[in-house]
Image (cartoon, rainbow, N blue to C red):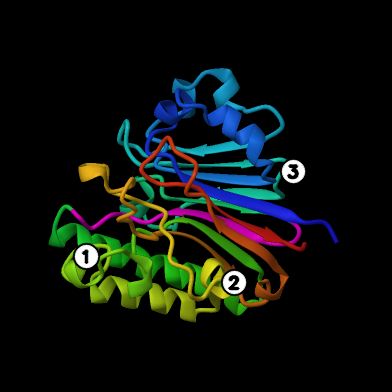
């Protein structure tokens, strides 16, 4: 059976990372599907070679607010269906969920809100995650194979951030945020990286302050989740810490499908 490589990257501004070699990286990574989060642009703001990269079908979901949030999915094979959102305008105006259906699985490209600006935003993040969990749970209950990729903005366990004790009261590692991620996984999803690398310490995001990336003081908040039916087909799960250009690095899986 053919291997399918899926890569996800919070680029923290698609135009910014394009100036730092995004298209060259895209050619090197050889992914069949690439999911971007935090694109911070509408497609009409992009040059043609970036809006429709060679060899890919490109689908863009910007936020209504200019220069904010947004996701995009590139695929070498045209999806059978493309749709967006969670069916709630409270969440969908921010351009955070793009869904592409393929014969072997349905892919959710997700950018979960951050809660770092205060309690109201933490509540919004938890409500978003609860709604996402319900939507995914309904699909998983039918037996549909799913792949959920993106920046989930939560480090799930203590192993997933460099300083768990100091961050117990920081959004991204709050008990209620971690519980919400646990509930999402309990719907029938597997954290692909932990499935293949249960004890590996590595991160996908570093604050741009105080040389955190150079000192590897980071968080693992970017994920590829797969439905339990697909977990035995996982052949690789990687976090590409050598790829720069954003405060996040890409994460990827290889599936035998």
Marks 1 and 2, how far apart at CA = 32 Å
Residue 216 image position (x, y, % from top left): 34, 53
Front residue (pair 93, 241):
241
Residue that carries the numbered disc 2 in the rendered image: 196
Q: Is residue 254 left or right of residue 221?
A: right
Mark 1 / mark 2, whichever is N-terminal: 1
Front residue (pair 100, 149):
149
Specify whether residue 96 is in view: yes
Marks 2 and 3, how far apart at CA = 27 Å
Mark 3 surroundings: few (<14), some (14-19) or many (≥20) residues within 10 A: few
Question: Mark 1, mark 2: which one is toward the viewer?
Answer: 2
Snapshot quadrant of residue 177: bottom left
Badge 3 element: loop
Badge 1 element: helix
Snapshot quadrant of residue 86: bottom left
Front residue (pair 86, 193):
193
Contact check, label 2 and label 3, Cβ < 8 Å? no
Residue that carries the numbered disc 3 in the rendered image: 77
Numbered range of the magenta stretch: 103-116
């Amino acid at each position: 059976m053919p291997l399918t490589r899926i890569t996800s990257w919070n680029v923290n501004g698609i135009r910014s990372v394009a100036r730092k070699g995004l298209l060259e990286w895209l050619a090197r990574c050889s992914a069949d599907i690439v999911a971007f989060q935090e694109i911070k642009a509408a497609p009409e703001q992009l040059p043609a070679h970036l809006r429709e990269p060679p060899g890919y079908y490109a689908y863009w979901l910007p936020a209504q607010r200019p220069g904010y949030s947004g996701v995009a999915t590139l695929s070498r094979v045209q999806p059978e269906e493309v749709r967006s959102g969670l069916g709630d305008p409270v969440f969908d105006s921010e351009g955070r969920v793009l869904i592409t259906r393929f014969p072997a699985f349905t892919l959710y490209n997700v950018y979960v809100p951050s809660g770092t600006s205060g309690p109201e935003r933490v509540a919004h993040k938890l409500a978003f995650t609860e709604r996402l969990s319900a939507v995914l749970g309904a699909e998983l209950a039918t037996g549909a194979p799913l792949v959920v990729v993106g920046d989930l903005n939560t480090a799930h366990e203590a192993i997933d951030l460099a300083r768990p004790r100091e961050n117990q009261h920081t959004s991204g590692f709050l008990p209620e945020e971690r519980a919400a991620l646990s509930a999402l996984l309990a719907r029938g999803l597997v954290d692909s990286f932990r499935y293949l690398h249960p004890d590996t310490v590595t991160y996908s995001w570093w604050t741009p302050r105080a040389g955190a990336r150079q000192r590897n003081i980071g968080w693992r908040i970017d994920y590829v989740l797969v439905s339990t039916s697909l977990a035995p087909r996982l052949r690789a799960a990687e976090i590409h810490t050598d790829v720069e250009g954003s405060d996040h690095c890409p994460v990827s899986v290889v599936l035998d499908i």
